[in-house]
Amino acid sequence: MSWELAGRVGTRVAGARGLTRLGTGQDPQADMSSLESDFAEVTAIAEEMVARSTGLRPLAGPARALVVDRPAWVQANLASFRSMLERALAEVDRPLPGGLLGGAAAGATRAAAGAELGALLGWMSSRVLGQYDILLAEAEDEGGVVSYVGPNVAAMERRHGFPPRQFRLWIAIHEVTHRAQFTGVPWMREYFVGLVERSIAALVPDPARMGEVFRRLADSLGKGVNPLGDMGLLGVMLSPEQLGAVEQVQALMSVLEGHGDVTMDRAGHDALPEARWFSQVLRDRRRHPPIGARIVQQLSGIGAKMRQYEQGERFVRAVEAAGGPELFAKVWQGAEWLPTLDELREPQSWLDRCDGGSGMPSAGSANQADPAGSANQADPAGSANQADPAGSAVPGAPSGPPGAPQGHAAAVDVPLGP
């Protein structure tokens, strides 16, 4: 991977899409100061709202709001991708069987990969409103930074006439919910990193499998099935074993995204009169992108990332309808309580596995074991760090819900839309 080329291409694409600076009015410096001061304040407010709603309190201290422009978002995510992929790329850079990627071909492949990644991140930089990236936090800030893409937030507010203060608090609730999930559940951070490392190992290409890939493509098309429907090109290229590792990340992220959306609605229900309006606008834009955006989403797997919001939210609401927030909070007790992809699609099967919420899941039936070992698991008997359903005042959730690529599972964001 040519990281330098990825950075250049990403910055150029981000800049080419307009409004790259934080300033959005007659006085750019004033606009920047307003965004920074607002997000610093609403992020602190959102943390307390999320803690009251979910019982999750971050162990890493208060969050720090960081307002960035689009090129800065691209560079930060390149750093995250690099930390995530370097181990796999060390394998890819070795000569493959038959010398397929030796010499000049290897250089061309690295350049093409860098240009592709840079273009995708540049395009995405105009869509993201906020982000909590646990992999970047793992490397640099000990989990404290929540990022907001200032130009995109301001553009959305102007386009739809959103009241800025309410809209910014609404975004902050979603992002600090993700921070609470990763830093308030003792086993989650290490568990997630372990899943990502396993997924990276699955991404090392095997040229010998290309014949099988083409056969699978032809078979899907012959049956009238879209071969890119689930994970884009990634889903076509990977073997069933490799897909299993990636699907574990997908299942976890679906739960976290759905919980983030439900919390965003619930925690802001009384404080944000316009929350339903924000929700409807983003949902409509997510479901009905223009044709160009649909093609990019399909090829890259971003479409699957966006479906996580809806699938995960349906699961959370179904579980809470059956047993209240206390029942859903069992997912914070350990990895064995997490649903599989099949259980996300059919929440009743998770409820059955958990005996209606009254017993532990049956051994070996969860979709994954803790890669890091069980020593870091939350103590269901009353760890002060896990969610405390009994002590959480959780009002009834109103109806109605409100991407980084699917392969970049660490990027938890609210998509802006085209």
Image (cartoon, rainbow, N blue to C red):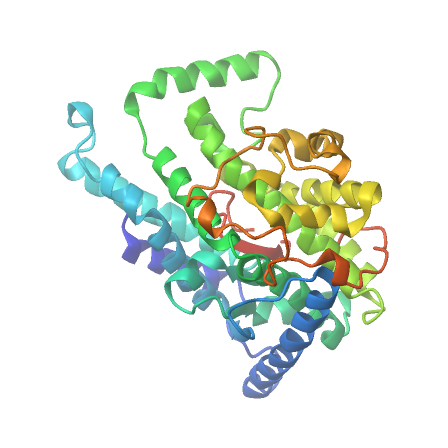
User: In this rendering, would 319 be left or right of 248?
Assistant: right
Give percent across and percent down for residue 64: 53, 75
* Viewer-side residue, 194 vs 199: 194
Q: Is residue 59 visible?
A: yes
| Relative vertical location of residue 169 with respect to residue 243 in this rendering, above or below | below
Residue 281 location, quadrant: bottom right
| Relative vertical location of residue 340 with respect to residue 382 in this rendering, above or below | above
Residue in the picture at 63% in, 43% down = 308
Give percent across and percent down for residue 74: 44, 61
Q: Is residue 292 visible?
A: no
Residue 194 location, quadrant: top left
Residue in the picture at 47% in, 64% down = 73
Residue in the picture at 80% in, 64% down = 393
* Viewer-side residue, 118 vs 73: 73
| Relative vertical location of residue 302 with respect to residue 416 in this rendering, above or below | above
Most extreme residue toward the front is 381
Give percent across and percent down for residue 166: 75, 73
Residue in the picture at 40% in, 63% down = 75
* Viewer-side residue, 105 vs 26: 105
| Relative vertical location of residue 298 with respect to residue 193 in this rendering, above or below | above
